[in-house]
Image (cartoon, rainbow, N blue to C red):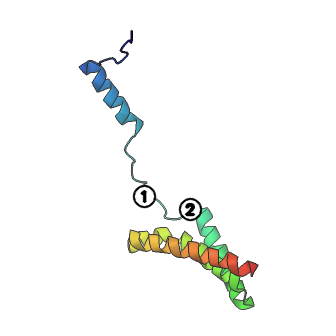
Amino acid sequence: MRRDYSFEFDEEERQTSSTHRLNMHPVLEPKPDGPMFSRGQQMSMMLSAVLLVYALLSGDMPLIFLLLSFLSYLLRPLAEKSVGLWLSNAMKGFSFALGLGAVTMAFL
């Protein structure tokens, strides 16, 4: 003899269950308006720019590619705010491809 273990919820339990499911996935709130870049990001951009000048003067192509890749990845929020999401996504792909090319050039 098989027992049926399926229980039927009454209306109150069904409402509680659906409310509980809704509370598990809260709506994401937008980021508060603050500075676009943190101090650490600003400092890393400045250091990358200084290293880029050094790489340009010394002619180190893999380092130039790597630093351009890093700078283009860091400047994505600026592009997203000024032009749109499509440019931000394009810069992300460009920076990954440029970084992969820099690593390839370094080992060849």
Q: Residue at x 69, y 86 (%)?
A: 61
Q: Position of residue 20 (x, y in %)?
A: 37, 29
* Quarter placement of the C terminus: bottom right
**What residue is shown at x 29% (from left), y 19% (from top)?**
9
Image: 82 above or below 57? above
**Does residue 78 sit above or below 8 in this rendering?**
below
Going by the numbered disc 1, the residue's amino acid type is Asp
Residue on which disc 2 sits: 38
- Label of residue 33 in the image: 1
Q: Secondary structure at mark 2?
A: loop
Extreme-front residue of the structure: 1
SS at mark 1 in the image? loop
Tell me which residue sits at (65%, 75%) in the image: 48
Residue at 40% from the left image edge and 72% from the top image edge: 86
Residue 3 picture location, percent across and down = 38, 12
First of labels 2, 1 by sequence position: 1
- Mark 1 surroundings within 10 Å by alpha-carbon count, few (fewer than 14), some (14 through 19), many (20 or more): few
Instruction: Please state the horizontal and vertical placement of residue 56, each as a whole percent of the image.
Output: 68, 88
Question: As rendered, which of 45 and 93 lies closer to the eye?
Answer: 93
Q: Which mark is residue 80?
A: none
Q: Is residue 71 above or below residue 31?
A: below
